[in-house]
């Protein structure tokens, strides 16, 4: 892109114009270095007028020395001719360490430069440090040898460590896996293979799973300590114990078919993601899973990598592990894939089961995942006193996501007036929600039916 073309652009997160070197320029250079890098053109006013800049060797040396002395960075500085004047282009790359100007740190938000707050600076400082690769105070005696050897057998069975020998000394296995440096364990080594503590400290990584009747009434609680393989195994068992399962016997085979409230593979994927991608720098925060009558809520102290959204992950799987050593071990054991497809598998299994799409939300504190179960069971619908036509709409809505009045008419072969009556009844009973107005309106299944959390809406048939 030429300078003329750039002049037609507006200032962005990575582009800014300055008329001359001043404190605002150095703050912007600090912000670019602390964000995603960027380009500053010096010699262009805020009104996009080319005022030019003196570019003698002495001037360039003075500016370059000032930037190095004030910011400790080495940008690329290049004079450019435009409309008979000289403009200075300054390219700044993203820095791996925070860059300060006069003792303060700046970041780029949209097209503005602003001062970092303490939390932003702390996040920046630790973002380039991998917790799992740091050296641990634990010693080899704290490692559970059987867990290590069991892992080697699993990895061989998965075809991901074909030449491994579980009979090797533990320190040899851990060193080969990058979990020991010299004679010292990494944080990942103990977290993956450590012995279960008899008395876990408050700062030890713990998985907490609770069963709630409502927002304040807890009717079941599990604190699961120990290494991550133990937390995964015990966590899966707790989830199965806290949700419902129905059994179907067809008569064609002696085996019974299980129908769980939620797809078990999706629950396992969500649990593994939380364990592998948790921010373990946050020592006093735990992974929490809250199970209600109609939904499950996961909280993981560790959001998506900066700049990555759930929409991007849905559109194109990406693997940017916060804890690469931990992620590698789970991959070798056959539990996860390297290609960031876990979230897509969660969405796929819910869609195949005809359940509402899970909701991901992330902020500076962490990530939450909300899963809703299909409360439109036969028992629930029987309470609603629906006619046969209305009942036919439920499986259609599970598959298609929504239905129009015309589509409902065609589905059950009725008049416009009867279709409107049926749909209005379904809305009044809290089964459907009307979206939009006029001819473009459609109907979707309600995520919060009227009796979704009532005592009668839940049937426990687990044996």
Image (cartoon, rainbow, N blue to C red):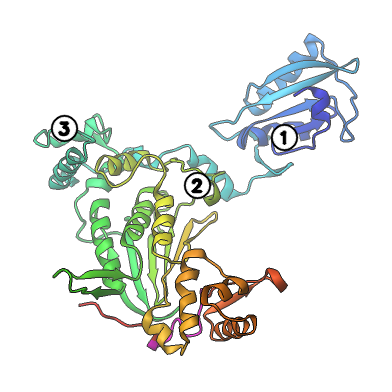
Q: Is residue 100 left or right of residue 138?
A: right
Disc 3 to disc 1, C-alpha distance:
52 Å
Q: Is residue 135 left or right of residue 380?
A: left
Quadrant of the snapshot with the C terminus? bottom left
User: In the picture shown, does residue 444 fall above or below 118?
Assistant: below
What secondary structure is found at the residue carrying circle 1?
helix
Q: What residue did someone put label 2 on? A: 313
Disc 2 to disc 1, C-alpha distance:
31 Å
What secondary structure is found at the residue carrying circle 3?
loop
Which secondary structure dominates the residues rendered in magenta?
Answer: loop
| Res 271 seen here | yes
Q: Nearer the viewer, residue 103 or 33?
A: 33
Quarter of the image for residue 373 reads bottom left
Instruction: Judge the density around disc 2: few (<14), some (14-19), many (≥20) Cα neighbours within 10 Å.
Output: some
Q: Which residues are magenta?
A: 447-456
* Residue 163: x %, y % from top left: 16, 29
Q: Earlier in the sequence, mark 2 or mark 1?
A: 1
């Amino acid at each position: 892109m030429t300078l003329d073309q750039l002049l037609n652009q507006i200032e962005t997160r990575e582009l800014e114009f300055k008329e001359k070197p001043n404190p605002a320029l150095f703050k912007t250079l600090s912000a670019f270095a602390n964000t995603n890098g960027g380009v500053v053109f010096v010699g262009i006013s805020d009104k996009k007028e080319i005022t030019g800049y003196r570019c003698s060797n002495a001037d360039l040396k003075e500016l370059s020395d000032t930037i190095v002395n004030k910011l400790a960075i080495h940008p690329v500085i290049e004079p450019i001719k435009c409309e008979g004047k000289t403009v200075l282009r300054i390219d700044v790359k993203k820095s791996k360490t925070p860059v300060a100007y006069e003792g303060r740190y700046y970041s780029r938000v949209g097209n503005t430069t602003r001062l970092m707050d303490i939390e932003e600076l702390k996040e920046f400082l630790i973002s380039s440090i991998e917790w799992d690769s740091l050296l641990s105070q634990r010693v080899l005696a704290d490692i559970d040898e059987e867990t290590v050897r069991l892992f080697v057998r699993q990895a061989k069975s998965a075809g991901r460590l074909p030449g491994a020998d579980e009979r090797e000394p533990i320190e040899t296995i851990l060193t080969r896996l990058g979990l020991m440096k010299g004679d010292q364990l990494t944080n990942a080594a103990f977290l993956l293979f450590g012995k279960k503590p008899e008395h876990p400290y408050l700062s030890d990584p713990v998985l907490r799973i609770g069963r709630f009747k409502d927002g304040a009434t807890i009717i079941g609680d599990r604190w699961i300590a120990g290494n991550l393989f133990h937390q995964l195994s015990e966590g899966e068992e707790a989830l199965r114990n806290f949700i419902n399962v129905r059994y179907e016997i067809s008569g064609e085979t002696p085996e019974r078919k299980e129908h769980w409230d939620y797809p078990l593979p999706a629950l396992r994927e969500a649990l593994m993601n939380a364990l592998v991608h948790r921010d373990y720098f946050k020592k006093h925060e735990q992974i929490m899973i809250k199970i209600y009558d109609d939904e499950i809520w996961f909280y993981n102290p560790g959001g998506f990598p900066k700049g990555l959204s759930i929409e991007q992950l849905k559109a194109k799987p990406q693997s940017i592990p916060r804890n690469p050593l931990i992620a590698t071990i789970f991959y070798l054991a056959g539990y996860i894939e390297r290609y960031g497809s876990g979230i897509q598998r969660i969405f796929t299994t819910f869609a195949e089961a005809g359940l509402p799409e899970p909701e991901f939300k992330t902020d500076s504190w962490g990530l939450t995942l909300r899963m809703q179960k299909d409360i439109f069971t036969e028992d629930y619908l029987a309470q609603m006193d629906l006619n046969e036509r209305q009942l036919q709409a439920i499986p259609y809505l599970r598959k298609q996501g929504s239905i129009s009045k015309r589509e409902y008419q065609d589905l059950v072969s009725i008049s416009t007036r009867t279709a409107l009556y049926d749909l209005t009844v379904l809305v009044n009973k809290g089964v459907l929600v009307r979206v939009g107005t006029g001819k473009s309106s459609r109907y979707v299944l309600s995520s919060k039916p009227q009796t979704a959390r009532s005592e009668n809406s839940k049937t426990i048939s687990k044996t």
